[in-house]
Protein backbone atom coordinates (compact mmCIF):
# COMPACT_ATOMS: atom_id res chain seq x y z
CA UNK A 1 0.00 0.00 0.00
CA UNK A 2 1.01 3.55 -0.69
CA UNK A 3 1.36 5.39 2.60
CA UNK A 4 1.58 8.81 0.97
CA UNK A 5 -1.57 10.67 0.06
CA UNK A 6 -0.15 12.73 -2.77
CA UNK A 7 -3.45 14.46 -3.54
CA UNK A 8 -3.48 15.85 0.02
CA UNK A 9 0.25 16.58 -0.02
CA UNK A 10 -0.17 18.65 -3.20
CA UNK A 11 -2.21 21.15 -1.19
CA UNK A 12 0.93 22.07 0.75
CA UNK A 13 2.54 23.30 -2.50
CA UNK A 14 0.86 26.51 -3.69
CA UNK A 15 2.77 26.64 -6.98
CA UNK A 16 1.24 23.33 -8.10
CA UNK A 17 -2.24 24.84 -7.91
CA UNK A 18 -2.24 26.75 -11.19
CA UNK A 19 -2.98 26.45 -14.86
CA UNK A 20 -0.26 26.54 -17.49
CA UNK A 21 -1.32 27.00 -21.12
CA UNK A 22 -4.91 26.26 -20.15
CA UNK A 23 -4.14 22.99 -18.31
CA UNK A 24 -3.61 22.11 -14.66
CA UNK A 25 0.14 22.23 -14.13
CA UNK A 26 1.83 18.80 -13.96
CA UNK A 27 5.28 19.30 -12.46
CA UNK A 28 7.59 16.49 -13.60
CA UNK A 29 10.84 18.45 -13.52
CA UNK A 30 11.78 17.51 -9.97
CA UNK A 31 15.26 16.38 -10.98
CA UNK A 32 15.99 19.99 -11.91
CA UNK A 33 14.31 21.42 -8.83
CA UNK A 34 11.50 20.57 -6.45
CA UNK A 35 8.64 22.84 -5.43
CA UNK A 36 8.43 24.25 -1.90
CA UNK A 37 5.71 23.52 0.66
CA UNK A 38 4.05 26.30 2.68
CA UNK A 39 5.93 24.98 5.73
CA UNK A 40 9.18 26.12 4.08
CA UNK A 41 7.85 29.33 2.51
CA UNK A 42 6.29 30.43 5.82
CA UNK A 43 9.44 29.67 7.78
CA UNK A 44 11.50 31.93 5.50
CA UNK A 45 8.86 34.64 5.54
CA UNK A 46 8.70 34.46 9.34
CA UNK A 47 12.48 34.91 9.55
CA UNK A 48 12.40 38.12 7.49
CA UNK A 49 9.25 39.40 9.21
CA UNK A 50 10.31 38.84 12.78
CA UNK A 51 13.99 38.13 13.46
CA UNK A 52 16.20 38.92 10.46
CA UNK A 53 19.70 39.67 11.73
CA UNK A 54 23.31 38.95 11.03
CA UNK A 55 24.55 36.09 13.17
CA UNK A 56 27.41 35.24 15.53
CA UNK A 57 28.76 38.74 15.85
CA UNK A 58 25.79 40.73 17.17
CA UNK A 59 25.24 40.82 20.88
CA UNK A 60 21.52 41.60 20.78
CA UNK A 61 18.24 39.75 20.91
CA UNK A 62 17.52 39.28 17.21
CA UNK A 63 21.12 38.24 16.51
CA UNK A 64 20.81 35.60 19.19
CA UNK A 65 17.53 34.33 17.73
CA UNK A 66 18.92 34.21 14.20
CA UNK A 67 22.10 32.47 15.40
CA UNK A 68 20.12 29.87 17.33
CA UNK A 69 17.85 29.17 14.35
CA UNK A 70 20.81 28.91 11.97
CA UNK A 71 22.63 26.48 14.27
CA UNK A 72 19.42 24.53 14.82
CA UNK A 73 19.15 24.12 11.03
CA UNK A 74 22.70 22.75 11.02
CA UNK A 75 21.64 20.17 13.62
CA UNK A 76 18.63 19.22 11.52
CA UNK A 77 20.95 18.50 8.60
CA UNK A 78 23.26 16.55 10.91
CA UNK A 79 20.41 14.31 12.07
CA UNK A 80 18.91 13.95 8.59
CA UNK A 81 22.10 12.40 7.20
CA UNK A 82 23.21 10.94 10.56
CA UNK A 83 26.49 12.83 10.84
CA UNK A 84 28.34 12.33 14.12
CA UNK A 85 28.45 16.06 14.90
CA UNK A 86 26.96 19.32 13.62
CA UNK A 87 30.55 20.58 13.29
CA UNK A 88 30.78 18.33 10.25
CA UNK A 89 28.06 20.30 8.43
CA UNK A 90 29.15 23.26 6.27
CA UNK A 91 26.52 25.46 4.64
CA UNK A 92 27.25 26.40 1.02
CA UNK A 93 25.17 27.59 -1.95
CA UNK A 94 24.52 24.13 -3.34
CA UNK A 95 26.10 20.97 -4.66
CA UNK A 96 28.12 22.82 -7.28
CA UNK A 97 29.67 25.15 -4.75
CA UNK A 98 30.21 22.27 -2.34
CA UNK A 99 32.20 20.18 -4.81
CA UNK A 100 34.22 23.24 -5.85
CA UNK A 101 34.94 23.87 -2.19
CA UNK A 102 36.36 20.38 -1.69
CA UNK A 103 38.33 20.48 -4.98
CA UNK A 104 39.78 23.89 -4.11
CA UNK A 105 40.62 23.04 -0.48
CA UNK A 106 41.35 19.33 -0.17
CA UNK A 107 42.35 19.04 -3.83
CA UNK A 108 44.59 22.09 -3.82
CA UNK A 109 46.20 21.04 -0.57
CA UNK A 110 46.97 17.40 -1.31
CA UNK A 111 47.25 16.94 -5.10
CA UNK A 112 50.74 16.99 -6.60
CA UNK A 113 51.86 16.56 -10.26
CA UNK A 114 51.27 13.03 -11.56
CA UNK A 115 48.48 12.28 -9.06
CA UNK A 116 45.13 10.93 -10.22
CA UNK A 117 41.49 11.65 -9.38
CA UNK A 118 38.61 9.34 -10.28
CA UNK A 119 35.04 10.42 -11.08
CA UNK A 120 32.43 8.50 -13.09
CA UNK A 121 30.94 8.66 -16.54
CA UNK A 122 27.50 8.95 -14.95
CA UNK A 123 28.36 12.15 -13.13
CA UNK A 124 26.81 15.58 -13.46
CA UNK A 125 29.09 18.27 -14.88
CA UNK A 126 29.24 19.67 -11.34
CA UNK A 127 31.25 16.61 -10.33
CA UNK A 128 33.46 16.65 -13.42
CA UNK A 129 34.46 20.24 -14.18
CA UNK A 130 35.76 21.23 -10.69
CA UNK A 131 38.03 18.15 -10.66
CA UNK A 132 39.11 18.70 -14.24
CA UNK A 133 40.14 22.26 -13.39
CA UNK A 134 42.16 21.42 -10.27
CA UNK A 135 43.76 18.47 -12.11
CA UNK A 136 44.79 20.72 -15.01
CA UNK A 137 46.20 23.26 -12.60
CA UNK A 138 48.12 20.68 -10.57
CA UNK A 139 49.29 18.49 -13.48
CA UNK A 140 47.10 15.57 -12.42
CA UNK A 141 45.04 13.08 -14.45
CA UNK A 142 41.27 12.77 -14.24
CA UNK A 143 39.84 9.29 -14.90
CA UNK A 144 36.24 8.10 -15.03
CA UNK A 145 34.57 4.82 -14.03
CA UNK A 146 32.82 3.70 -17.25
CA UNK A 147 29.16 2.82 -17.60
CA UNK A 148 27.58 -0.11 -19.46
CA UNK A 149 24.75 0.17 -21.98
CA UNK A 150 22.10 0.02 -19.24
CA UNK A 151 23.54 3.02 -17.45
CA UNK A 152 25.14 1.00 -14.62
CA UNK A 153 28.71 1.75 -13.53
CA UNK A 154 31.17 -1.05 -14.25
CA UNK A 155 32.74 -1.48 -10.82
CA UNK A 156 35.28 -4.07 -11.94
CA UNK A 157 36.75 -1.30 -14.10
CA UNK A 158 36.91 0.97 -11.06
CA UNK A 159 39.36 -1.38 -9.37
CA UNK A 160 41.52 -1.36 -12.49
CA UNK A 161 41.59 2.46 -12.63
CA UNK A 162 43.10 2.69 -9.14
CA UNK A 163 46.88 3.09 -9.05
CA UNK A 164 49.36 4.08 -6.32
CA UNK A 165 48.89 7.68 -7.59
CA UNK A 166 45.10 7.79 -7.04
CA UNK A 167 44.47 10.49 -4.43
CA UNK A 168 40.73 11.09 -4.54
CA UNK A 169 37.46 9.53 -5.69
CA UNK A 170 34.37 11.68 -6.29
CA UNK A 171 31.16 10.06 -7.58
CA UNK A 172 27.44 10.63 -7.72
CA UNK A 173 25.10 8.66 -5.49
CA UNK A 174 22.19 8.77 -7.96
CA UNK A 175 22.60 9.69 -11.63
CA UNK A 176 20.29 12.45 -12.82
CA UNK A 177 19.70 11.15 -16.36
CA UNK A 178 18.76 7.48 -15.87
CA UNK A 179 18.16 7.51 -12.09
CA UNK A 180 20.89 4.90 -11.54
CA UNK A 181 21.59 4.29 -7.85
CA UNK A 182 25.32 3.69 -7.75
CA UNK A 183 26.67 1.18 -5.25
CA UNK A 184 28.50 3.92 -3.40
CA UNK A 185 28.99 1.79 -0.31
CA UNK A 186 31.04 -0.62 -2.38
CA UNK A 187 32.89 2.22 -4.13
CA UNK A 188 33.80 3.70 -0.75
CA UNK A 189 34.95 0.29 0.56
CA UNK A 190 37.17 -0.25 -2.46
CA UNK A 191 38.62 3.28 -2.30
CA UNK A 192 39.23 3.04 1.44
CA UNK A 193 40.99 -0.29 1.04
CA UNK A 194 43.56 1.79 -0.92
CA UNK A 195 43.43 4.66 1.63
CA UNK A 196 41.74 6.97 -0.88
CA UNK A 197 39.15 9.44 0.43
CA UNK A 198 35.73 9.69 -1.24
CA UNK A 199 33.19 12.44 -1.95
CA UNK A 200 29.61 11.46 -2.74
CA UNK A 201 27.49 13.88 -4.79
CA UNK A 202 24.09 13.45 -3.17
CA UNK A 203 22.17 16.03 -5.24
CA UNK A 204 19.87 13.38 -6.72
CA UNK A 205 19.75 10.97 -3.80
CA UNK A 206 18.97 13.17 -0.82
CA UNK A 207 15.22 13.53 -1.56
CA UNK A 208 14.65 9.98 -2.75
CA UNK A 209 16.44 7.43 -0.59
CA UNK A 210 17.74 7.33 3.00
CA UNK A 211 21.25 8.69 3.49
CA UNK A 212 23.40 7.74 6.46
CA UNK A 213 26.90 9.15 6.06
CA UNK A 214 28.32 7.07 8.92
CA UNK A 215 26.88 3.84 7.60
CA UNK A 216 28.23 4.71 4.13
CA UNK A 217 31.57 5.57 5.70
CA UNK A 218 32.01 8.46 3.27
CA UNK A 219 34.53 11.25 3.81
CA UNK A 220 32.43 13.95 2.13
CA UNK A 221 28.76 14.12 1.14
CA UNK A 222 27.34 17.11 -0.74
CA UNK A 223 23.76 18.13 -1.61
CA UNK A 224 21.52 21.05 -2.61
CA UNK A 225 18.53 22.26 -0.57
CA UNK A 226 16.41 23.01 -3.64
CA UNK A 227 16.35 19.34 -4.68
CA UNK A 228 14.67 18.40 -1.39
CA UNK A 229 11.80 20.91 -1.17
CA UNK A 230 14.08 23.55 0.38
CA UNK A 231 15.07 26.96 -0.95
CA UNK A 232 17.52 27.77 -3.72
CA UNK A 233 20.92 29.09 -2.75
CA UNK A 234 21.55 26.76 0.19
CA UNK A 235 23.34 23.43 0.22
CA UNK A 236 25.55 21.31 2.39
CA UNK A 237 29.02 19.85 2.53
CA UNK A 238 29.34 17.09 5.09
CA UNK A 239 32.99 16.40 5.87
CA UNK A 240 34.35 14.00 8.47
CA UNK A 241 35.72 15.99 11.37
CA UNK A 242 39.26 14.63 11.31
CA UNK A 243 39.55 15.62 7.64
CA UNK A 244 37.97 19.07 8.04
CA UNK A 245 40.27 19.81 10.99
CA UNK A 246 43.29 19.43 8.70
CA UNK A 247 41.77 21.23 5.72
CA UNK A 248 42.83 24.73 4.70
CA UNK A 249 40.12 27.39 4.36
CA UNK A 250 38.53 28.19 1.01
CA UNK A 251 37.40 31.82 0.88
CA UNK A 252 38.86 34.37 3.27
CA UNK A 253 36.87 36.99 5.16
CA UNK A 254 34.83 37.48 8.29
CA UNK A 255 33.58 34.60 10.43
CA UNK A 256 36.29 32.18 9.25
CA UNK A 257 38.96 33.76 11.51
CA UNK A 258 39.80 34.00 15.20
CA UNK A 259 42.45 36.72 14.95
CA UNK A 260 43.68 38.97 12.16
CA UNK A 261 46.68 41.29 11.87
CA UNK A 262 47.86 42.83 8.62
CA UNK A 263 50.59 40.17 8.48
CA UNK A 264 48.80 37.07 9.69
CA UNK A 265 45.44 35.37 10.28
CA UNK A 266 44.48 32.65 12.75
CA UNK A 267 41.69 30.59 11.22
CA UNK A 268 38.54 29.52 12.98
CA UNK A 269 37.69 25.84 13.57
CA UNK A 270 35.31 23.99 11.20
CA UNK A 271 32.60 24.56 10.15
CA UNK A 272 33.08 28.35 10.56
CA UNK A 273 36.48 28.06 8.84
CA UNK A 274 34.65 27.24 5.61
CA UNK A 275 31.83 29.78 5.94
CA UNK A 276 33.45 33.13 5.18
CA UNK A 277 31.16 36.17 5.29
CA UNK A 278 27.51 36.57 6.17
CA UNK A 279 25.82 33.22 5.56
CA UNK A 280 22.46 32.55 3.92
CA UNK A 281 20.65 32.46 7.24
CA UNK A 282 17.07 32.52 5.92
CA UNK A 283 17.55 29.68 3.48
CA UNK A 284 19.46 27.52 5.94
CA UNK A 285 16.45 27.85 8.24
CA UNK A 286 14.20 27.09 5.25
CA UNK A 287 16.23 23.95 4.52
CA UNK A 288 15.76 22.87 8.14
CA UNK A 289 11.98 23.21 7.64
CA UNK A 290 12.17 21.19 4.40
CA UNK A 291 14.03 18.37 6.17
CA UNK A 292 11.40 18.40 8.93
CA UNK A 293 8.73 18.11 6.26
CA UNK A 294 10.41 15.12 4.61
CA UNK A 295 11.13 13.47 7.96
CA UNK A 296 7.50 13.84 8.95
CA UNK A 297 6.34 12.01 5.78
CA UNK A 298 9.18 9.48 6.04
CA UNK A 299 11.90 9.07 3.44
CA UNK A 300 11.15 5.34 3.12
CA UNK A 301 7.49 6.08 2.36
CA UNK A 302 8.59 8.66 -0.21
CA UNK A 303 10.98 6.17 -1.76
CA UNK A 304 8.30 3.49 -2.01
CA UNK A 305 5.77 5.92 -3.49
CA UNK A 306 8.20 7.22 -6.09
CA UNK A 307 9.41 3.73 -6.96
CA UNK A 308 5.87 2.61 -7.78
CA UNK A 309 5.24 5.74 -9.80
CA UNK A 310 8.48 5.36 -11.76
CA UNK A 311 7.80 1.72 -12.59
CA UNK A 312 4.23 2.58 -13.61
CA UNK A 313 5.54 5.37 -15.85
CA UNK A 314 8.09 3.05 -17.51
CA UNK A 315 5.37 0.45 -18.21
CA UNK A 316 3.01 3.02 -19.68
CA UNK A 317 5.64 4.87 -21.70
CA UNK A 318 7.07 1.64 -23.14
CA UNK A 319 3.74 1.06 -24.90
CA UNK A 320 3.85 4.32 -26.86
CA UNK A 321 4.72 3.83 -30.51
CA UNK A 322 8.11 5.26 -31.46
CA UNK A 323 9.15 5.90 -27.85
CA UNK A 324 12.51 4.51 -26.74
CA UNK A 325 13.32 4.37 -23.02
CA UNK A 326 16.98 5.11 -22.40
CA UNK A 327 18.91 3.34 -19.68
CA UNK A 328 17.68 0.42 -17.66
CA UNK A 329 19.91 0.36 -14.60
CA UNK A 330 19.52 -2.44 -12.04
CA UNK A 331 18.64 -0.06 -9.22
CA UNK A 332 17.00 3.25 -10.01
CA UNK A 333 14.92 6.04 -8.54
CA UNK A 334 12.43 8.55 -9.74
CA UNK A 335 13.79 9.24 -13.24
CA UNK A 336 12.65 8.19 -16.71
CA UNK A 337 14.59 9.16 -19.84
CA UNK A 338 13.33 8.69 -23.38
CA UNK A 339 13.36 9.91 -26.99
CA UNK A 340 10.63 9.88 -29.65
CA UNK A 341 11.16 8.75 -33.24
CA UNK A 342 11.14 11.70 -35.60
CA UNK A 343 10.42 14.35 -32.97
CA UNK A 344 13.38 16.30 -31.63
CA UNK A 345 13.92 16.36 -27.87
CA UNK A 346 13.54 20.15 -27.43
CA UNK A 347 10.37 20.09 -29.54
CA UNK A 348 8.93 17.31 -27.38
CA UNK A 349 9.59 19.47 -24.33
CA UNK A 350 7.80 22.43 -25.91
CA UNK A 351 4.82 20.31 -27.00
CA UNK A 352 4.46 18.88 -23.47
CA UNK A 353 4.61 22.40 -22.04
CA UNK A 354 1.65 23.31 -24.26
CA UNK A 355 -0.25 20.59 -22.38
CA UNK A 356 0.79 22.06 -19.02
CA UNK A 357 3.41 19.36 -18.39
CA UNK A 358 6.87 20.45 -17.23
CA UNK A 359 9.73 18.04 -17.98
CA UNK A 360 13.40 18.51 -18.72
CA UNK A 361 14.36 18.10 -22.39
CA UNK A 362 18.08 18.42 -23.10
CA UNK A 363 21.41 17.02 -21.98
CA UNK A 364 20.73 17.40 -18.23
CA UNK A 365 24.27 18.65 -17.52
CA UNK A 366 25.47 15.07 -17.85
CA UNK A 367 26.79 14.83 -21.40
CA UNK A 368 29.28 11.99 -20.79
CA UNK A 369 26.45 9.87 -19.32
CA UNK A 370 24.10 10.32 -22.28
CA UNK A 371 26.92 9.92 -24.79
CA UNK A 372 27.98 6.65 -23.17
CA UNK A 373 24.58 5.31 -24.22
CA UNK A 374 24.81 6.91 -27.66
CA UNK A 375 22.56 9.94 -27.15
CA UNK A 376 23.03 13.70 -27.06
CA UNK A 377 19.71 14.57 -25.41
CA UNK A 378 16.66 13.03 -23.84
CA UNK A 379 13.24 13.90 -22.46
CA UNK A 380 13.32 13.39 -18.72
CA UNK A 381 10.28 13.31 -16.44
CA UNK A 382 11.26 13.00 -12.76
CA UNK A 383 8.92 12.20 -9.89
CA UNK A 384 8.55 13.57 -6.39
CA UNK A 385 6.40 12.97 -3.32
CA UNK A 386 3.50 15.08 -4.62
CA UNK A 387 3.22 13.33 -8.00
CA UNK A 388 0.31 10.95 -8.64
CA UNK A 389 -0.63 8.23 -11.11
CA UNK A 390 -2.91 10.82 -12.67
CA UNK A 391 0.17 12.96 -13.43
CA UNK A 392 1.73 9.97 -15.22
CA UNK A 393 -1.52 9.32 -17.10
CA UNK A 394 -1.61 12.94 -18.27
CA UNK A 395 1.97 12.63 -19.51
CA UNK A 396 1.12 9.45 -21.42
CA UNK A 397 -2.03 10.97 -22.97
CA UNK A 398 -0.09 14.07 -24.04
CA UNK A 399 2.67 11.95 -25.59
CA UNK A 400 0.17 9.81 -27.49
CA UNK A 401 -1.31 13.01 -28.85
CA UNK A 402 2.15 14.31 -29.87
CA UNK A 403 3.12 11.02 -31.52
CA UNK A 404 -0.27 10.67 -33.20
CA UNK A 405 -0.15 14.12 -34.74
CA UNK A 406 3.13 13.43 -36.52
N1 LIG B 1 24.95 16.78 -9.16
C1 LIG B 1 23.83 16.20 -9.63
C2 LIG B 1 23.78 14.71 -9.72
C3 LIG B 1 22.76 17.00 -10.01
O1 LIG B 1 21.66 16.43 -10.51
C4 LIG B 1 22.85 18.41 -9.88
C5 LIG B 1 21.69 19.33 -10.26
N2 LIG B 1 21.15 19.12 -11.52
C6 LIG B 1 24.04 18.95 -9.39
C7 LIG B 1 25.06 18.11 -9.03
C8 LIG B 1 24.23 20.43 -9.25
O2 LIG B 1 23.39 20.94 -8.25
P1 LIG B 1 23.23 22.51 -8.09
O3 LIG B 1 22.91 23.05 -9.45
O4 LIG B 1 22.11 22.65 -7.12
O5 LIG B 1 24.51 23.04 -7.56
Image (spheres, grey):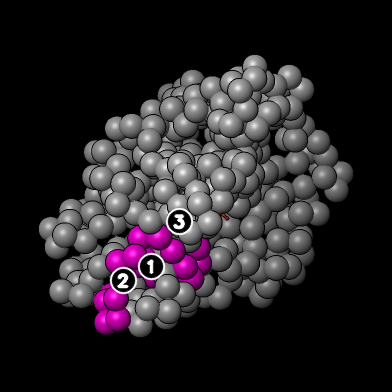
Q: Which secondary structure lies at badge 2?
A: loop
Residue 112 vs residue 356, the one in the foreground: 112
Q: CA distance from mark 1 to mark 2?
A: 6 Å
Measuring 65% from the left and 63% from the top, which residue is drawn there? 361
Query: 194 or 278, which lies in front?
Result: 278
The image position of residue 47, as x and y in percent, is 69, 25
Residue ID for mark 1: 108
Q: For residue 304, which quarter of the picture?
A: top left
Q: Quadrant of the N terminus?
A: top left
384 displayed left or right of 88: right
- The magenta segment: 104-130
Rendered residue at 70%/42% (across/down): 26
Q: Give percent across and percent down for residue 243.
A: 28, 50
Q: Residue at x 64, y 20 (%)?
A: 60
List the single residue furthest toward the right: 22
Split into 4 quadrants, where in the image is the C terminus?
Answer: bottom right
Position of residue 322 in the picture relative to residue 13 (left or right): left
Q: Quadrant of residue 299?
A: top left
- Dot 1 falls on a residue whose secondary structure is helix
Question: Which of label 2 and label 3 is nearer to you?
Answer: 3
Name the residue that disc number 2 marks.
111
Asked if residue 121 is among those painted magenta in the image, a careful observer would answer yes
Q: Earlier in the sequence, mark 2 or mark 3?
A: 2
The residue at which mark 3 appears reads as 264
Element under label 3?
Answer: loop
Q: Is mark 2 within 8 Å of ligand 1?
A: no
Q: Mark 3 and mark 1: span between their CA atoms?
A: 21 Å
Residue 371 colored in magenta in the image = no
Do the residues bearing badges 1 and 2 touch, measured as CB atoms within 8 Å?
yes
Amino acid sequence: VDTLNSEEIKKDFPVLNQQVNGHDLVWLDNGATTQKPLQVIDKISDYYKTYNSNIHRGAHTLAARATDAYEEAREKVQHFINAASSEEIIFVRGTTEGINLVAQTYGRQYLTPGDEVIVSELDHHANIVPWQRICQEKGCTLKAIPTDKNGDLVLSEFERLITPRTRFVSVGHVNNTFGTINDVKRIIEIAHSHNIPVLIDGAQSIAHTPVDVQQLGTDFFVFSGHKIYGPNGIGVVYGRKDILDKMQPWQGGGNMITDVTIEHTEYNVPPARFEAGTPNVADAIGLGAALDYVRHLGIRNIEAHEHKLTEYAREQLAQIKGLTLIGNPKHRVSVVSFVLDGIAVPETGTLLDKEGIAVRAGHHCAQPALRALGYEMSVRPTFALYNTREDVDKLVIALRKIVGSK
